[in-house]
Image: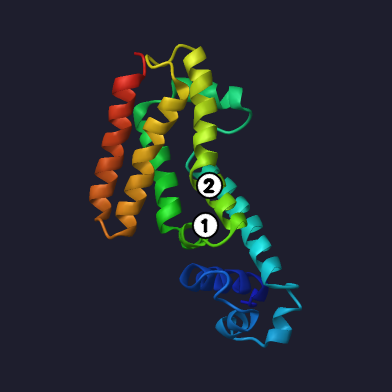
Amino acid sequence: MKRNTKEDILIAALNLFAEKGFDGVSVRDIAEEVGIRQSSLYKHYESKQDIFDNILIRMEEQYQRMTLEVRAPQGAMQDVAKAYEIITTEELKEIARGMFFYWTESDYASRFRKMLLVEQYKSEEKSRLYHEYLTDGPLKFMAELFRLLVERECFIQEDWEFLALEFYSPIIFLMARYDSGAEREVIIRQLDQHIEHFAAHYRKD
């Protein structure tokens, strides 16, 4: 099989960024990790920033594939809300599991997340990306989703921003526990319990 050097560079760079930080890695370091000359790397990417920008593009592509694979509702927010209105708790647990283990176990996404965890304190750009992918972005999406579901009278709690925070905060906490070495079976059980608890307490029958 022919080697995909362009892809190898992205993966090597992401691994190094997650380990040493963006500023702690040089183009030479990336080239050595891939096993090519620095001049050869420049045939594929103009700079370290160009490599990083392409990592972002690849993340978007992979994230879109993942949402399709876990069968998360797609489309305009109104259509997504309609789908979640009738989704079962078991289906919701499957989606939550798929997304959780994408961010914690997928080589690409987990390293990207860990890189941003560190880099958010060093760079305004990386801080913005961290919040876009892992805090403010998901919360904004969920708040809008819950707003539409509240309008459809699907929940007993009418504060959709509270619902978004109540749903998402334990998931972020479980990611931190999993990163720290918590057993996979324990995390699955606690994630399922969280989804069941949320549905039982806030969804209308």
Confirm whether residue 179 shows in the render. yes
What residue is at 61 percent from the left and 51 percent from the top? 60
Position of 17 compared to 101: left or right? right
Q: Work out whether residue 58 or residue 131 is closer to the camera in this orientation and state it.
A: 131
Point out residue 192 in the picture as x, y percentages from the top left corner. 29, 38
Circles 2 and 1: CB distance less than 8 Å? yes
Q: Work out whether residue 98 or residue 138 is closer to the camera in this orientation and state it.
A: 138
What residue is at 64 percent from the left and 86 percent from the top? 36
Q: Which residue is mark 2?
A: 131
Confirm whether residue 91 shows in the render. no
Point out residue 30 in the picture as x, y percentages from the top left corner. 60, 79
Position of 90 compared to 53: left or right? left
| Amino acid type at image mark 2 | His
Name the image quarter holding the N terminus. bottom right
What residue is at 54 percent from the left and 75 percent from the top? 24
Q: Which mark is residue 120?
A: 1
Name the image quarter holding the C terminus. top left
